[in-house]
Amino acid sequence: MVSAKDNEGAGGPVSAVPPYWEEAKIELMKRDRIMKKLIPQFGDLHLVGHDDPFTTLARSIVGQQVTTKAADVAWKKLLLVSPKCTPAQIIKAGAEQLAACGLSKRKTEYILDLADHFKNKRVHTSQWDQMDDEAVIAELVQIRGIGRWTAEMFLIFNLLRPNVLPLDDPGLIQGISQNYFSGEPVSRSDAREVSANWEPWRTVATWYLWRSLDPVAVE
């Protein structure tokens, strides 16, 4: 499992503050004593979204199960064979060129399947803004190589959904452990219990817990 950091460099940054961010900060600081201490440490920093769905998902696949450094190297090589990172360019590059970027056979297949889904409109990108979180996740996990965690990262970083709780994310679990349980191991039910206080701003609380572990967000 890779860190959520690997998604923060994907898809072209959109620097505008998410519309709910300030309200969420105020509410979280009112309700949660840990958030009251944590949020002010990061001043005006906020979640930076990414605007291109295909690039965001392709970058997530490249980053799976490898270090951030290895993912960055492979991604830069991929952009040499597909500078605009469009589905058509990826399909034209083909399996051999993608594999030469350092991608495994499986990841190569995943990215080609992703490109095929987008090129042939087997995903409904224009409707995602109107669909609820679980409906978007259900559509995304039909693509090879995209599981629930990757879909949740997409909801956070591309669709800027305010209430995502990625329980499979090691950074979230570690952040809860360190900030709420003095470093003791944390179960999913522990995490759910803590997060109940964050509704409907679980994305925002998650982002601040990530920052507590790594203060600098990758742009």
Image (cartoon, rainbow, N blue to C red):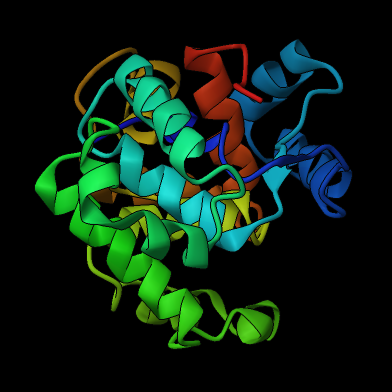
Q: How far across and how far down the image is residue 68, in percent?
A: 37, 21
Q: Residue at x 33, y 53 (%)?
A: 149
Q: Quadrant of the N terminus?
A: top left
Q: Tell me if residue 2 comes above or below residue 130 in the rendering.
A: above
Q: Is residue 79 left or right of residue 205?
A: left
Q: Residue 115 appears at what percent x and percent y?
A: 41, 68
Q: Residue furthest left?
A: 105
The image quarter containing residue 134 is: bottom left
Is 207 situated left or right of 44 in this image?
Answer: left
Res. 51 in view: yes
Residue at 42% x, 57% y: name it: 90
Q: Is the residue 158 above or below the residue 127 in the image? A: above
> Is residue 176 at all visible to an observer of this figure?
no
Q: Residue at x 23, y 34 (%)?
A: 100
Q: Is residue 156 left or right of residue 28?
A: left
Tally of numbered discs: 0
Check the image and report above or below for 148 versus 99: below
Quarter of the rendering containing residue 83 = top right
**Position in image of residue 117 (x %, y %):** 40, 78
Residue 40 sits above or below residue 107 on the image: above
Is 104 or 59 nearer to us in this picture? 104
Residue 219 found in image quarter: top right
Frontmost residue, 7 versus 17: 7
